[in-house]
Structures are given as structure tokens and as C-alpha cells.
Image (spheres, rainbow, N blue to C red):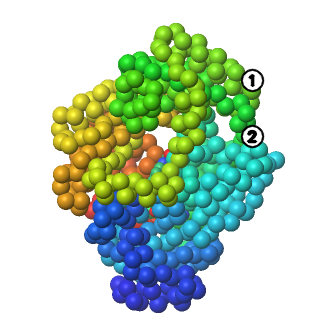
Amino acid sequence: MLSREEIVTGLQKIIPSHQVITEEQLLKEYSIDRYYKVESIWGIYSLPTPAAIVKPSNTQEVANILMFCNENLINVVPRTGGSATEGGLETAVENSIVLDGSDMKKIINIDTYNMQATVECGVVLETLENEVRALGFTTGHSPQSKPLAQLGGLTATRSTGQFSTLYGGIEELIVGLEAVFPNGQITRIKNVPRRAAGPDIRHVIVGNEGTMSFITEVTIKLFKYYPENHQFYGYILDDMELGFKLIHDVITAGYRPSVVRLYSPEDAHYHFSHFHEGKAVLLFMAEGPKGIVEATSKAIEEIVGKANIQQVDSKHIANWFYSLNWDEKKVEEERIEVKETNNCGFTTEVSANWSAIYPIYKNSIDRIRKEIPDLTLLGAHSSHSYINGTNLYFVYYYDMKCKPEEEMSKYHDPIQNIIVEETLKAGGSMCHHHGVGKHRTHFLAEEYGNSLYILKELKKAFDPKGIMNKGTIFGLNEKL
Ligand SMILES: Cc1cc2nc3c(=O)[nH]c(=O)nc-3n(C[C@H](O)[C@H](O)[C@H](O)COP(=O)(O)OP(=O)(O)OC[C@H]3O[C@@H](n4cnc5c(N)ncnc54)[C@H](O)[C@@H]3O)c2cc1C
């Protein structure tokens, strides 16, 4: 095994030395992701810091770095926007390197005839979206972290966005991509509308969370953008079960609003305190060509209208919607608030079929209320719907009555465990869009059942020496 110094000098031989960063404070900050709030907020860093942060400027450099790490058994933690929330960026073992693709930020091609854009992994989604919007198009991808997250990480986590009910998650938006494997093999999957030439190999890469390959370039679909046709609908109601039923009825009737959301009363209070009257909030946004928006709007009015619930002014929904995204400023404000108040929160997102979703909501909320102390907010919303079911995004805040470094074990982990246990028991998935990271790995066997065989064989085939993002998706002690 190489020492830290040998790792740094070895790297400096294969890429320009200014691209190998060893500044102590940065190494600390790059040893975590947003999961460990104690570390970023109170400056208590407990994980091994990486030997270096390496910033490649092209695909060949990525290949050279990976080959060097593979030969010398150095753990590689891929990174782009740094907005991960489940520990995927944590450097879990000594003398890792962070392979940071954020300097690979060329928009290579915006092809508005074939409706696709090709970008390097370090392009911030908001930058690309602004470019294509100026031409009258959209990527259709709009996670709340759009100003922070970059295309490499967004693809590696199977991210999803606020308009996913219409456009789909990133797995449906990625046309083709380029990725590099630990042995230095560069692979490029071509951009075609569809093919039936064997399994869809894009999905070995999309969602790999940096555990099998490093994504260097992606091609993403484009859609025509019609902001002038946007329509918003908002309702308040007493009964979450009825809310889920109404979403079900709109979606299964064949309509695709771009946004379909149901907020529990507590979660609604966080966003809509000025009008929700202590009730749950159901909202929709329809977008696209005029005729489609009109048909979708009519269906929402008819289906929800039959339930006789109170409609609110659509301006409330539009106003809320246009200020939903998080940028660095909001993240910093949150850090300051947590430090001042000791009131801290987190989220856990899961998915399930229609018939299971209300029981998961109810059982999780009931158990958390009973089992977890010091809660100041506990709620959930559904925000991404499909023909066969929907997701649930639990939101919880608590007054920390412990040392900052005990926060996760006292509050976050037990709450997340309850939600995941209730979800798996009901046949749902433990993770809708934040990735497994390093903090849901203990549920992997139950999540996958005997199909875990496929995932493990992929890992063994593409990363036989186990150098890619140790402890992510597969726990550190997981036997492959
Ligand atoms: C305020 C906030 C709001 C959020 N909202 C959403 C949301 O609406 N929807 C959603 O899906 N997520 C959301 N997230 C989570 C996060 O933004 C996503 O997971 C996003 O996809 C991460 O992109 P990134 O570029 O920041 O990746 P990073 O944080 O840098 O990395 C994420 C993971 O991908 C791996 N990775 C990064 N780059 C590469 C690469 N080039 N090749 C291979 N692996 C790589 C990393 O090792 C890590 O495991 C939110 C996060 C925050 C902080």
C-alpha cells in the first residue's frame, strides 16, 4: 500500500500537479457529504480525510487516475456537485482520493433538431437548463438541488426532479453516456432513440453511485418548453387517504400533470402556513402544448371536483413553486439556523404501489411519534407519481438534546430505520431518489431479495479490486 505522500506524488506524475489538491481544510470538507451535518456545521470531522482531491480535465485523465488507483488499491470517491445526502461522498477508509469531475464542465452540443444535449459530467444542471430555456427548450429535469447538482452526480444517483410525473426520472432522460471503469477502460454508449440489442447497458452506469465507474459525459433529452401554458391547482383536505386516492385517480385515468403533490398537514404547515388551515394540501401543475394542458386541467377539475374538497387560489401554488429550489445561499442559511437553534432536520424518501402507500405513511408516522423524542416537525409528502404507485418523502425535525456528534444515532438513524422497515414490510422500496449512499446499506439484502445476486456480480465484474467508493451501496463489511 502506498503512503499518503506516495499517492500524491504518484498522481502528480500522471496529471498536472495543480490538479492534485492537498489543502487540509478542503480535504476535511471533501471527506463528507451533506449527511453529516455535525461535521459541516460544527466543524467536527470524524472520518478519515482523503490523501488528495484530484480534478481531471478530460476523460483520458480520468482513465489514467483510475488505472493508477486500481494498480495501487487506492479507494476512489467520485464527486461532482457535492449535494449528496446519504453519505455517498464520505471517504470511509484511510488514504482515499476524491475524484472530482467538477472542472469538466463543457456543454459539448445542444442539438435542438434531434432534441438532445451532450455535456461533460461537471456541468451544473441549472446552467444547462438556462442555456436550453433561452432556446425555447427544457431538459424536464428539475431536482430541488438544480443550482448545485451536476450532470455526473445526477446520473450516478438516479436523481429525479419536480416535473418527473410528466418527464420521468433521469433514467428516462439519459440517451447515452460515456464512463470510465477502474481498469481505465473508456466506454461510450451511443445516442439512439431505442434499441433492442441486448439488455440496456446504460443502467449499469445510471445509479451506480460511483461504485463501478466514473461518468464523464452524458447526453440528455430535450423537450419544447411552454411556460405560457402552465396551469396550477391547489386544494386543502382533511384526509391523506383521500388525497392518495385522488392522485391515483388522475394518474391511472391516463393524465400526466408535471407536478402532482400531496402534503400532510404538518408538512403543509412548513410550506403553506398562509392558507392551508391546518389541513393537508393537494396540488397539481399541468404543462406542455396548450391542448394537452387544457385536457389535463379539465381532468383534474373533474376528478378532484367530484371529491368536493376546498380549492385554493392557484397563485398560492405558483408562488410557492417558483421559489422551491435550494442554492448555496439557502444551504448556508440552514447551517446557521441549525447552529443557533439546535433544531435539526432531515428527510427519507421511499416508494410503493398505490395500495401500500397510505399504510406506510400511517404506520411510519404513528411509530415515529411513539418511539422518537424531541420532535418538532413530522410530516410527509408524495411528489412523484407513476401508473402503479407513488413516492413518500418524509420530513422530520427535532430539538437536539445530545452532543452534535450523537445526533445521527439518537434521532436520524432510528427515524430512517422506522420508515424503511415499514416500507419494506409493505413491499415498497427503501429509496426513491437519494441513493443508498453509506447509510441505507444495512437494508440492501432485504431491498433486493435474491436479485442481489445480479447487483453483486456487476460489482465484482466491473470493480474486481473493490476500489470504487468503498462502503457505498455495499456496506464496508458486505461479502461480495
Ligand atoms: C437541498 C437539496 C435538495 C435536493 N433535492 C433533490 C431532488 O429534488 N431530487 C433528487 O433526486 N435529489 C435531490 N437531492 C440530492 C442530490 O442533489 C442528488 O443526489 C444529486 O443527484 C447529486 O448530484 P451531485 O452532482 O451533487 O453529486 P455528488 O453529491 O457529487 O455525488 C453523488 C453521488 O454520486 C457519485 N458521483 C458523483 N459524480 C460522479 C461521476 N461523475 N461518476 C460516478 N459517480 C459519481 C458520488 O460518489 C456520490 O455517491 C437534493 C440535495 C440537496 C442538498
Question: Does ligand 1 reach within 8 Å of label 1's beta carbon?
Answer: no
Element on which disc 2 rests = strand
- Whether residues under marks 2 and 1 lie with C-beta atoms below 8 angstroms apart, the answer is no
Location of the N terminus (image quadrant): bottom left
Task: Name above or below for residue 416 compared with residue 117.
Answer: above
Q: In this figure, what is the number of numbered marks?
A: 2
Q: Quadrant of the C terminus?
A: bottom left
| Residue 467 screen position, x and y as percent | 41, 71
Residue holding disc 1? 291
Residue that appears at 61% across and 23% down: 255
- Classify residue 104 by image quadrant: bottom right
Q: Amino acid at mark 2?
A: Lys
Q: Is residue 184 above or below residue 393?
A: below
Pointer 2 local density, CA inside 10 Å: few below 14, some 14–19, many at least 20: some
The image position of residue 18, as x and y in percent, is 55, 85
Q: Nearer the viewer, residue 117 or 24?
A: 24
Tell which of 152 and 40 is nearer to you. Answer: 40
Left or right relative to 285: residue 275 = left
Closer to the camera in the image, 419 or 25: 25
Residue assigned mark 2? 224
Q: Position of residue 17 (x, y in %)?
A: 54, 87
Res. 37 visible in picture: yes
In the picture, measured across the screen, residue 64 lies left or right of residue 369, that is right
- Assign a secondary structure to mark 1: helix
Q: Amino acid at mark 1?
A: Gly
Q: Residue at x 40, y 37 (%)?
A: 270
Q: Is residue 259 above or below residue 37?
A: above
